[in-house]
Image (cartoon, rainbow, N blue to C red):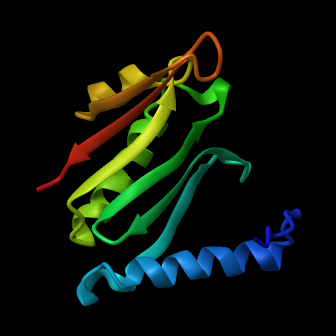
Amino acid sequence: MFKGNIAPSTAQDSEYVRQQLVAYNATHVSEELRNRYEELNFNIKNEAGEIVAGVLSTLCWNWIELDILWVDSDQRHRGYGSQLLHEVERLAHEKSCDFVMLNTFSYQAPEFYKKHGYQLITTIENAPRGHHHYYFKKDLT
């Protein structure tokens, strides 16, 4: 039996693998949702034009996955995180999404997301060691 050679992927190899999975997934998703994929990234800048907070998220099929929400440590507790989160949710409603999902760590902001109506769906303990990794979801329908 032939065993393939494992080698590090180039950026082009990685994109090929990604596109193969996207094509496979498309055969299992309704036509209406098949091509719904869009990055939704935005930020907040201060008076000097420096980014003090930002969000990176992805609309995928019928939900938005919030990948990163960051606020500069000197700018926290000014409402920037809430402002960004509300914008993600506004876009999710505008684009007829059913829910928003995200993950965070115990040393980040699980209480912030709970305060905004996100429900804990699972916890992975000891990830990273000594901490917890939380997954949250907020239904919009």
Q: How many marks?
A: 0
Q: Residue 8 at x, y = what percent?
A: 88, 62
What residue is drawn where x is 87% and y is 67%?
A: 5
In this view of the protein, which residue sits in the foreground, 50 or 53?
53
The residue drawn where x is 31% and y is 62% is: 63
Q: Could you tell me which residue is drawn at 53 percent across and 75 percent down?
A: 21
Q: Nearer the viewer, residue 139 or 2?
A: 2
Using the image, determine if residue 3 lies above or below residue 70. below
Q: Is residue 69 left or right of residue 136?
A: right
Q: Is residue 115 above or below residue 23?
A: above
The part of the image, by quadrant, that contains residue 129 is top right
Q: Position of residue 60 (x, y in %)?
A: 39, 68
Could you tell me which quadrant the C terminus lies in?
Answer: bottom left
Q: List x then y, in percent, for residue 128.
A: 64, 22
Could you tell me which quadrant the N terminus lies in? Answer: bottom right
Residue 135 in the image: above or below residue 102 = above
